Image (spheres, rainbow, N blue to C red):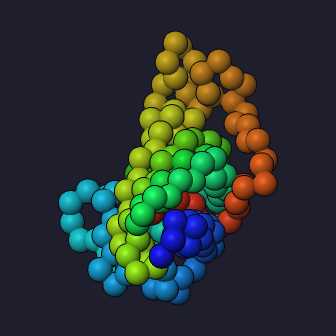
Amino acid sequence: MTAEANKAVVTRFIDEVFLGRNFDAVDELCREDFTAHTWGPGPTGRAELKAAIERVNAGLSDVTMRVDDMVAEDDRVAVRLTSSATQSGPFMGMPPSGKHYEIGEIHWFRLEDGRIAEHWHEADFLGMLRQLGAMPQPGGGSAGTPAGGSGEASASGSDAERTGSAGDAAASR
């Protein structure tokens, strides 16, 4: 597969799996031996990815993902994106807060035969916890308000912004 074809698969994965919560797309876009290097030791695979997406969707609403950069070479695709959501249900052990967050994320994908074989994910979870009010702000800001800000998260609304019911702040949680 070409780098452009691999980027197209990853774009579909973000749109259809992370945002669209389309479990049929998980089976179509991920290899049967899919490995997530995201949620620590324990079982990994397509069923575990689906369960992680369900957990995230139970706690988040108004999810968006804006792709800021996507780079592909050989069998690897790297994506830097900005995700945002409202915590509308229990999430990561926290009760619903009704608060909104916006964070940066990095995703690495390895593809094999046109399907995703492996996924790595890094995100600003500390920033997310601060914005949701679970951690104090640095410099004495109140919890739930971005440092030096009014509490309103901003997004640039680029053509690459994606929205949906499921977030990737998603598959790793």
Q: Can the viewer see residue 86? A: no
Residue 116 vs 160, above or below: the answer is: below
| The one of 16 and 112 positioned closer to us in this rendering | 112
Task: Say which residue appears at 48% left-offset and 68% top-offset.
Answer: 53
Residue 106: x %, y % from top left: 48, 48
Residue most toward the top?
Answer: 139
| The one of 106 and 95 positioned closer to us in this rendering | 106
Residue 52: x %, y % from top left: 42, 67
Residue 48: x %, y % from top left: 35, 74
Pick the quarter of the image with the C terminus: bottom left
Relative placement, left or right, of 167 versus 64 is left
Relative placement, left or right, of 34 versus 125 is left
Relative placement, left or right, of 125 versus 48 is right
Q: Can the viewer see residue 153? A: yes
Task: Say which residue appears at 68% left-offset and 65% top-offset.
Answer: 164
Q: Quadrant of residue 16?
A: bottom right
Residue 40: x %, y % from top left: 26, 56
